[in-house]
Each structure stands twice: as structure tokens, then as C-alpha cells.
Image (cartoon, rainbow, N blue to C red):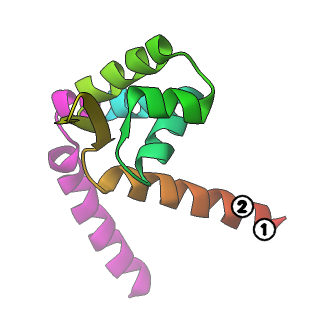
Amino acid sequence: MENENFEIEHQKALHNLKRNIPSDGDLEAMVNIFKAFGDMTRVKIILALSKTPLSVGEIADTLDMSQSSISHQLSILKQLNLVSNARRGRNIHYRLSDQHIITIFNQTKEHIIEDENEY
């Protein structure tokens, strides 16, 4: 009986699988976000922005990098809607677009810690 119930549930899941896979456009957007997370400088920028909004100069000083390289990375993050900006006086300050981004990072960190504790 248990095997029979498993097989019925498995067949239902298999039947629904094709319908539940995101569209190619959504999958491409997901892949592009993961590509953005694949660069250490962009990860550092995201982690810095998770604490407070920052200007390009403040990020550059914090990360000991040039403003031009920070600006380049921020433009990539902005295109992917991972960061947004707002003018504050003479400066433009960047911030994370939403908290989903840092949630992904926190879950990744928990995964790493979990893996380390298994060994």
C-alpha cells in the first residue's frame, strides 16, 4: 500500500513537472542573477549595501578599489535590478533593491556552515 501511494504521488508530480518549470525568460533572469553573484567584487558590494546605503566613493574606500571599477560593477547590479540608487545632496547613494538578495546570501552562508559542521 505504501509503495502504491508513493507511485501515485510520483506520477502526479511527474505530470505537473513540465507545467511548473519557469519560462525560458524567467530562467534566463535567474541565471543572470547567479552570474552576478559569481563575482567576488559584486558580492562584497552587495554585502556592504546590506548594511547601509553607500555612494560610489564610500564603497570604493571600503573595498580599497577604484571608483571606476565600483561604478562598472554597480551598473551591472543595477541592470539586474539588484541595486537601486537615489540622490542625496550632491551624491548618489546605492542600496539593495530588496531584502530577497540578502536572504539568498544568508541562506548560502548557512549552507556553508552546515556543510562545515558535517565533517
The amino acid pointed to by label 1 is Glu
Question: Can see residue 40?
Answer: yes
The structure residue drawn at horizontal position 49% and vertical position 46%, both measured from the top left corner, is: 47
Residue of label 2:
115
Quarter of image, res 15: bottom left
The structure residue drawn at horizontal position 41% and vertical position 86%, both measured from the top left corner, is: 2
The amino acid pointed to by label 2 is Asp
Across and down, in percent, residue 69 comes to: 49, 14
Outermost residue to the right: 119
What is the C-alpha distance between the residues marked 1 and 2? 5 Å
Mark 2: give few (<14), some (14-19) or many (20+) Cα within 10 Å: few
The structure residue drawn at horizontal position 37% and vertical position 75%, both measured from the top left corner, is: 6
Outermost residue to the front: 89
> What is the secondary structure assignment of the residue under circle 2?
helix
Q: Quadrant of the N terminus?
A: bottom left
Q: Judge whether 38 appears above or below 11 on screen.
A: above
The structure residue drawn at horizontal position 43% and vertical position 79%, both measured from the top left corner, is: 3
Across and down, in percent, residue 4 comes to: 35, 78
Mark 1: give few (<14), some (14-19) or many (20+) Cα within 10 Å: few
Question: Can see residue 28?
Answer: no
Q: Judge whether 118 appears above or below 61 on screen.
A: below
Query: Which contiguous range is marked in magenta?
Result: 1-29
Camera-nearest residue between 13 and 5: 13
Camera-nearest residue between 9 and 55: 55
* Residue 56 in the figure: left or right of residue 109: left
Quarter of image, res 26: top left
Camera-nearest residue between 4 and 10: 10
* Residue 89 in the figure: left or right of residue 109: left
> What is the secondary structure assignment of the residue under circle 1?
helix
Residue of label 1:
118
1 and 2 marks in contact (CB < 8 Å): yes
